[in-house]
Amino acid sequence: MTAHITLEFFGAAREVTGSCYLLTVGDKRLLVDCGMIQGSAADEARNANPFPFDVHKIDAVVLTHAHIDHSGRLPLLSKSGYTGPIYTHAASRDLCAIMLVDSAYLNEKETEWENRKRQRKHLPLLEPLYTIDDARAVMNQFESLEYDKRSEILPGVALQLRDAGHILGSAIAELWLEHNGVSRKLVFSGDLGHHGAPILRDPTMVDEADLVIMESTYGNRLHRSWDATWAELEEVITSAKNQRSNVLIPAFAVGRTQELLYAFNRNFEAWQMERWSIFLDSPMAIEATEVYTKHSNLYDKEAVAFERANGNPFMPSNLHISRTAAESMNINTIESGAIIIAGSGMCTGGRIKHHLKHNIWRRDCHLLIVGFQARGTLGRQLVDGAKQINIWGETINVAAHIHTIGGFSAHADGEGLVKWYSNFRDHPPVALVHGEPEAMEVLASRVQGQGAQQVFQPELGNKLDLVKLKMQPK
């Protein structure tokens, strides 16, 4: 009998978001990731399109990590009829319980706002992509796995998760596939972490594969060194304190917030942090930090040692947790000496907009940008030097000092990606995903320089025959 093992690319193919890959092994079908497409309104509208495969025929899902561009359509998958298991690391499950509910809340609110406009125009009303109830329901399908333990998840399919070092619980997925006497091993990188990042371990090196499916987000870039990043952060904090000002930090709830809290705690004396009051003003970041605290077994050696010596690494002694709206509003009465960490990370919503409204017009205010700011976002306007911004219909002058600290990326850079690939024996074929074409082209050239047998840059809908290892058009 003929062996049948194929891989189809239904997301993050020559683009950065919407990770989704379908493996067929004989009569078994396995989905790796089911992420939200993010970006322009036209891009995000694609999330409502029917899945390009029969949802009812999917036997299992493997989730590499909790970020919404990898997990965000799982509630929709379940809502559409998928009833099987979702295999992921326990920490990813805990983060998804927070992030998918938050995603559903935003879906519901955006649909509510749009329907108000449609009502006035006598247009048919819309339904949200999925609801909070849908997000909570899909969590019942999650099955937690540990790192470095191989499990048979379907007949002819075995899975092992390895630490990817990207965010808490992020995983490289090793998959062993067998059908009619033909065996193939695939390695999905997921999102690989930034070497030397605080808290988490560096990405696990893997040495064997028949095909590597590798992210390429920063395949054409090199990150600033961590030493330079910490030095710049200290310089800004010191300068702001000398001016007796407030510091605003829009930060992503998962990963970036915890890195900042850890940095402030670890450098408490050296950076004279006792002179500040630090406010964590993001309900989602507060919940995510609790998950990071729970899974201390995933920390790197330095974070483990710090926790043993000092307790919770994310709780400097001057940290104030702001859970309620009233607590958040009270922060705006403080004119100096406050470091305010709030979402959203690109200033597109959340409590940071309130703090911008009350502070950005002040000449002694400092705004720290510690994450990527997409085109069209309020954060990007500020990075690009906008002299005025609009918040809830009010035009506000920008007089604050804007600092962009670029070394905080949670992704491996081009050098890190090449280093990870170079550990594989026999230079296996590579399929580059999760990146813009420009980044892919540069990384493809570098991987070829490492001796890669073949380098694919699949487009949406492409199918790879894993028995023949040749690209076939849709």
Image: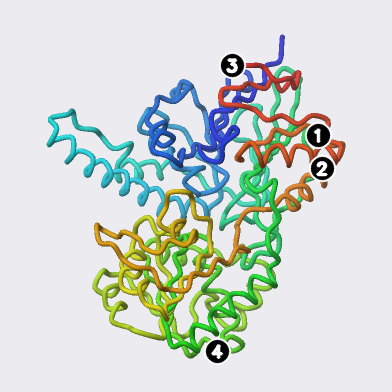
Query: Which label belongs to residue 40?
Result: none
Measured as percent of width and height from the top left, residue 341 is found at 43, 70
Residue 457 quadrant: top right
Q: Residues within 10 Å of mark 2 (few under 14, many from 20)?
A: some
Q: Identify the residue under disc 3.
A: 474
Q: Is residue 116 left or right of residue 421?
A: left
Dot 4, crowdedness within 10 Å: few (<14), some or many (≥20)?
Answer: some
Q: Amino acid at mark 4?
A: Gln
Q: Are marks 4 and 2 in contact (CB under 8 Å)?
A: no
- Residue sitting farthest toward the front: 387
Q: Nearer the viewer, residue 348 or 462?
A: 348
Q: Nearer the viewer, mark 3 or mark 2?
A: 3
Residue positioned 56% across, 68% down in the render: 259
- Residue 424 badge: 2
Of residues 345 and 322, which is closer to you in this image?
Answer: 345
On screen, residue 361 above or below 57: below
| Of callouts 4 and 2, the N-terminal one | 4
Residue 276: image quadrant is bottom left
Q: Are marks 2 and 1 in contact (CB under 8 Å)?
A: yes
Residue type, label 3: Lys
- x, y percentage for residue 453? 83, 30
Q: Secondary structure at mark 3?
A: loop
First in sequence: mark 3 vs mark 2: 2
Residue 249, x across and y down, in percent: 45, 69
Mark nearer the N terminus (4 vs 3): 4
Q: Amino acid at mark 1?
A: Pro
Under mark 2, the amino acid is Phe
